[in-house]
Structure formats: structure tokens, C-alpha cells
Image (spheres, rainbow, N blue to C red):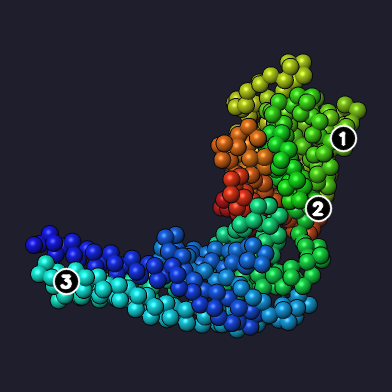
Amino acid sequence: MRLRRAAAVLLVLLATGGSAVGALAVFSVDRDLTVGTIRLSADPGHAGALDIYVPLVDWGVRFDAVRLPARLSLDLRALDRAAVAEVARGREPDVEALRGEAEDAIASYIRLLLAFTAAASLALGVLSALALRGRAAPLRLTLPVAGGATALACLAIVFLLPPRGAIEDPEYYANGPDIPVALRAIDQATGTAETISQELNDQLVGLARLIAAPDERGTVGELPHLTLASDLHNNLLALPTLERAVRKGPLFFAGDLTSSGSPFEVALTRRVARIGDPFVFVTGNHDSDVLARRLAAAGAIVLTERGRLLPGGGLGDVVVNVDGLRVAGYSDPFERRRGERYRDRGSEATESQQRAFADWLRPLAGRVDVVMTHSPALTELAVEELRADPPARPLAILTGHTHEPALRTSENLVEMNGGTVGGGGTGNLEKDQPFGLAVLARERSARFVPLLADTVQIDAQSGAAKAERSRLDLGEGGG
């Protein structure tokens, strides 16, 4: 008898709780704001978050502000084009009023959701109690269970679903197949991420300008920037996406353009050397001396620790000017050689190689803004020194090799790795490595002052793109 009662109570609980979760998943409402119509909904079964998504440009921003294991979503369904045009012409929206409208819409949605959830869960709970009624499951036992479970579900919605705390640390994402989708979204995203007012303001203005003047967007107020890519590994399929992603500005390629640097592979250099304005390159352990010479002959800026490789085979200055930046580069110690038939020479930096790199960089600190080499392991000793004794002026160290995006900052030091722009190469796609690159933006000034770092990752299987922006704090204690 006790076992049957326990089973009946459990079934009523499952029916009531399951209907509450189902109600949460299917219920949505549309609300009109000054700028357009939004749809509010919830998606249970995820880490709690507030999602703002714009289907028109396939872009969204996510905040860790919900304690219920569900995403509270605000999707922009339709726009008031007159209001958008006013914003695009420079009229700032009333952000506080818009925020109030959004908060009212969320409150209204939660009230209706509560009523819908209570009705659905209580109805199914009561029906389950009636279906199970009998000596083992009297209604005086099962009906209070259904009522109690319904009350708990409603209390969870009331106290855990509304966004709470600071709306900050946004995560930007896009679901389209191309990197530019994510990058265009980032261009319009806020830089401060400190208050919801600033978020709404920047996002609304950016969206308005994108819709009202798409051909002109991106040229006004754009920060000077460089794009960092590496580890293409001869994956020609990734080149069109890389070309679209770089757009204007220099492309810094931190090695492993090819798989072995053989003459067959260097045929791609003619196309690659035209990507970026200009294309700046250091070799990786999968590149070769022949590849480096071919790139230099094709017009690329090929950097070595002994100086820039010139088209005729000679060497120029160690520090070169690239788009107003003072740049130096260090060839990978394991780059392949024609005289050795392009054999694999290894990839793991030794202590002596780390010391050699540190000795090379030490006198350059303060004289360069950007240093690029392939392997972050090669820079470990130099980075330790720079963290202990920070350079007088900001310095960015750009690397690749690991196929994993990375960003670290400390006083006057940025270390950045974009991952693998070729998904690890066509021979490694079964490893499900995401395609990735990074963008470093800086102040418009004579001095190098890095401001923002964007990292972009694309899933090779689904095509889903994810872009994240980090403000760079190079003050003491950053990183």
C-alpha cells in the first residue's frame, strides 16, 4: 500500500512538474515597443541567461542574469522603420524610456506565463490525481501534491526567471555560416558592457544604421584594427571566408599557412598575399624557406628575426611600419627547408630557443608595438620577463600553433592567439576543430593603445558562429 501511494504521488508530481516545464517552453507573447515588436519566450534546460536576438541580422547578445535554468529570450520581430530612420540620422533614442518599456514587457510576460503555467500544471496534476484515485491514492493525498507542485513551479518563475543583478559581461553570437556575420555584429556592439542603458543605446543605433544605410555602415567611426589568423594548413576552402572577414586593414598571419611548405602548396601564395592591406607573415613549423621567399616576391611583408625578407632574397629592417604600427617578427625555429626535402623538424620549443627569443626581444621592448611569432611556447621566457618588468609602452605578442584561441593581458602587454583559421586543415576536419581568428582594435592616436580584442569561432559542422569582445585593461593587475 505504501509503495503504491509513493508511486501515485511521484506520478502526480511528474505530471505537474512536466506540464509546468512544457508551459514554460511553449508560451510566448508579442509586445510593441517604440522601436518595433518583440517576442518574449523562455527556453528551459539551459544555463540561465537573458537573450536579445535580432533575426534580421542573425545576431544576438547573451547575459548571465537569470537564475532559473532557462533562457529568457527577447527576439526583435518587426521594426518601426520611421523610428529606425530617425536614429540612423543621428537622433539618440530615449534609452531610459525604452528600457522601461522592455522591463514592463518582461513583467507582463511573466504575469501571463504564471497564469498559463499554473492553469496547465494544475489541470494536468488534477487529471492525473483523478486518474489514479483509489484506496492507494486518495484525492485528499494527490490533490494537495498537485497544488503544492504547481505553487512551487510558480514561485520558481517569480523569483528565478526575472533578470537580476548587473547586466554585464555580454557574450555575442551569430548563427549564420560566415565570420563576417559575427564581425558585423561585434562592430555594432557596445564597448563598455557596464550598464543596460549603454547596451541598448549602442545596439539600437548600430541596428538602425545597418538597416537604413547598409552600404555606408562600417566606415564611420571604425577603430583602426588588425586581423590575426594562423594555421590555415593549406585549407583552400577557408580562403573565401578569410577574405570577407579581413575586409580593410592588415592581416597578420602567424604561421602554418601550408602543411609542409612544398612547391605544390606554395601555389596558393599568389592569392593569399593579396588578402589584407597588407599581408604580414612569419613562418610556422609547417611552412618552409621556399614559401617565405615566394610570399615576399608576391608582395607580402615576411618578417624574420634578422629582418624583413625582401623580394630579391636580401634582408631589410628588423622593425617595419605596418599601418602606423611598429612591427617585428620571428621565424619559427622549426620551419622546413628545401635542402632537407621539407621534412618535419619538430614543433616544441626548447629552453635554448626560448632564451634566444627572449634575448632577441629584450632590446626591442619599447621600440615595437607588435611582435609576431608562431608558437606561444617560444615566448614563455620572454613573457615572464615582461610580466615581471613591464615594458614602458604597450606591446602585443601575436601567436598561433595551438589551434586554440587565447587572450591574456597584463601591464602594457597583450598576448593573443586567434586559433586556427583553417579548422586545423582539410585533413583534420574530423577532429571538429572550429575555424577561428581574432581582431585587435586600437585608439586613433600616434601611440599604440590597444582597446578591444574580438575572437571569432565557427563550428565546422553546423556553421554556427560565435564572436566575443573583450575590453583590454593593460593597467597593473590586468589579465
Residue occupying image coordinates x 71% and y 33%: 234
**SS at badge 2:** loop
Judge left or right: residue 240 versus residue 414. right
Relative height, residue 14 to residue 325 (above, below): below
Q: CA distance from mark 1 to mark 2?
A: 19 Å
Q: Quadrant of residue 132?
A: bottom left
* Position of the N terminus by quadrant: bottom left
- Is residue 205 shown to the viewer in this render? yes
- Is residue 359 shown to the viewer in this render? no
Relative height, residue 391 to residue 223 (above, below): above
Label number found at residue 248 = 2
* Pair 1/3: label in front: 3
The residue sitting at the right extreme is 312
Say what amino acid the circle numbered 2 marks.
Lys
Q: Along the line of sight, which residue is nearer the eye, 406 or 388? A: 406
Chain-order first, disc 1 or disc 2: 2
Q: Quadrant of residue 336?
A: top right
Q: Along the line of sight, which residue is nearer the eye, 277 or 314? A: 277
Residue 125 screen position, x and y as percent = 27, 72
Residue occupying image coordinates x 39% and y 78%: 116
The residue beneath circle 3 is: 133
Chain-order first, disc 1 or disc 3: 3
Q: Along the line of sight, which residue is nearer the eye, 14 or 344? A: 14
Residue occupying image coordinates x 69% and y 34%: 233
Answer yes or no: do the residues labelled 2 and 3 have beta carbons within 8 Å?
no
**SS at badge 3:** loop
Residue 380 screen position, x and y as percent = 60, 35
Say what amino acid the circle numbered 3 marks.
Arg
The residue beneath circle 1 is: 298
